[in-house]
Image: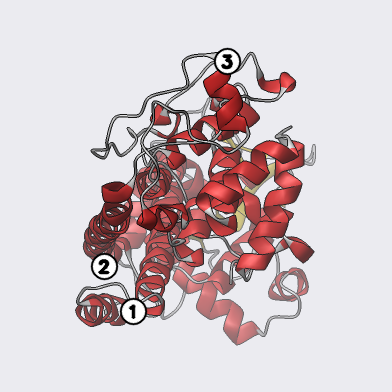
């Protein structure tokens, strides 16, 4: 049996209130109390920052626990281990005796061990005639069993704090990447705005990040960076809509008639028209002169032969200007809104408009878009914008029944100047488009 009562340390070591409290807590252990010692040790490793002990001290505690013969620490057993310094040094990979003493004292001070010193300060055990332990002198593991629930709670808190810090760091990294690439795109393409001020504000917040950050430091910085990103996105959206509206206005004033055929390929004749709600945005509707469709076979034949029906006015001399495709949007912005097309580029990356158009041809075939539908889109929108539309359709392919029919419908609207690519791109940016890693 283990000695009952409070024991004081041997020699010149003084008794402390912490040692007294540890022994008092250990006396209250219920006989049926039990805990897996190695699961408890893992919890100790997690809770180490809150317990104020070093990893070397935990190594010494691990060695002491290995001298306890059972897997479970049980309140009905004697929880005293009594290895010599030589044996303890072997199980701590040759730790020096003076270092052992220092870490043992730290464990006792932290309330994880208690001393059971013999009259002469040696560690040993007395057994009865049946080989059972009568009295043991050494270190008691009872404080570990008594504080098992507290240690597990501390370990859970440390784990939760670590996961929260990890998520905060990830979010800060993503927001910083978004801000730098959005500002870089705006500066590269010469968009109007005080981008230098945005960059200075971003730099101020980034410089406030310490090398070793805590949750309390990261949370306000993350809020400021997310607010800055929102402002930049709103400003970019305004610039793109204004730029696109200004670019279309001149063409609409001269637009009189659409001479393109309304026929579609046999593979797409069952397409049910879907509006730009697939992208979460209504198409940009601009005022235009009403257009009369060919009403009979003669008019349709004249239209196919490039002739004007007699009931329609002759084209104006300046009508050739309306056939010019709109200016493409910045490549960086397109790849931010449509990152899914990047792996289809040459070598798995896209660094130029030529790469994007090459990827669009591959994706066109994959989406079962006929060559004629893509060719018409290139004529109406321009090769760069047609490739951009293919990238947008790929992003929302799960919401589109017929990619070929949808492309033809957008092409017809573009010919009538009823379709604008800017709102579609901004809608994709808002609904989850992230910067592509390999985009140039």
Question: Foreground: 431 or 312?
Answer: 312
Earlier in the chain: of badge 1 and badge 3, it is 1
Gap between marks 2 and 3, in whole Å?
74 Å
Residue bearing mark 2: 217
70 versus 33 height, above or below: below
Residue 253 position in % (x across, y down): 26, 49
Dot 3 alpha-carbon crowd within 10 angstroms: few under 14, some 14 to 19, many 20 or more: few
> Which residue, given by chain and number where applicable, does mark 1 sit on?
210
Please give the residue where the numbered disc 3 appears in the rendered image: 297
Residue 290 position within the rendered picture, expressed as x and y whole percent measured from the top left: 29, 29
Q: Is residue 208 left or right of residue 118?
A: left
Q: Residue at x 41, y 71 (%)?
A: 185
What SS does tag 2 mark? helix
Please tell me whether mark 3 sits on a helix, a strand or a loop: helix
Q: Quadrant of the C terminus?
A: bottom right
Between discs 1 and 2, the one toward the N terminus? 1
Q: How far separated are the C-alphas under marks 1 and 2?
A: 8 Å
Looking at the image, is mark 2 or mark 3 nearer the viewer?
3
């Amino acid at each position: 049996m283990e000695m009952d009562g409070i024991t004081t340390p041997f020699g010149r070591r003084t008794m402390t209130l912490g040692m007294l409290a540890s022994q008092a807590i250990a006396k209250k252990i219920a006989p049926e109390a039990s805990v897996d010692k190695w699961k408890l040790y893992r919890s100790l490793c997690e809770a180490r920052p809150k317990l104020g002990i070093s990893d070397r001290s935990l190594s010494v505690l691990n060695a002491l626990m290995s001298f306890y013969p059972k897997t479970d620490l049980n309140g009905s057993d004697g929880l005293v281990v009594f290895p010599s310094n030589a044996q303890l040094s072997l199980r701590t990979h040759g730790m020096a005796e003076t270092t052992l003493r220092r870490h043992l004292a730290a464990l006792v001070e932290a309330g994880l061990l208690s001393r059971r010193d013999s009259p002469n300060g040696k560690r040993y055990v007395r057994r009865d005639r049946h080989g059972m332990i009568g009295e043991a002198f050494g270190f008691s593991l009872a404080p570990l069993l008594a504080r098992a629930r507290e240690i597990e709670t501390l370990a859970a808190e440390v784990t939760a704090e670590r996961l929260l810090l990890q998520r905060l760091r990830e979010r800060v990294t993503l927001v910083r990447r978004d801000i730098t690439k959005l500002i870089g795109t705006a500066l590269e393409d010469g968009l109007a705005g005080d981008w230098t001020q945005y960059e200075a504000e971003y730099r101020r917040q980034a410089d406030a990040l310490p090398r070793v950050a805590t949750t309390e430091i990261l949370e306000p910085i993350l809020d400021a960076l997310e607010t800055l990103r929102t402002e930049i996105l709103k400003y970019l959206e305004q610039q793109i809509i204004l730029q696109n509206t200004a670019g279309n206005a001149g063409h609409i004033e001269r637009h009189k008639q659409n001479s393109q055929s309304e026929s579609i390929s046999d593979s797409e004749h069952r397409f049910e028209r879907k509006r730009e709600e697939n992208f979460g945005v209504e198409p940009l509707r601009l005022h235009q002169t009403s257009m009369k469709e060919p009403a009979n076979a003669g008019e349709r034949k004249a239209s196919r032969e490039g002739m004007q029906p007699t009931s329609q006015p002759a084209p104006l001399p300046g009508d050739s200007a309306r056939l010019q495709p709109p200016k493409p949007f910045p490549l960086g912005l397109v790849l931010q809104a449509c990152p899914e097309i990047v792996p289809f580029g040459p070598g798995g990356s896209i660094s130029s408009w030529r790469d994007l158009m090459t990827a669009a041809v591959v994706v066109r075939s994959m989406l079962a878009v006929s060559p004629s539908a893509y060719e018409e889109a290139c004529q109406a929108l321009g090769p760069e914008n047609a490739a951009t539309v293919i990238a947008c359709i790929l992003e929302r392919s799960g919401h589109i029944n017929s990619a070929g029919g949808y492309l033809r419908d957008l092409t017809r609207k573009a010919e009538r100047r009823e379709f604008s690519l800017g709102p579609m791109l901004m809608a994709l940016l808002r609904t989850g488009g992230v910067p592509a890693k390999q985009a140039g």
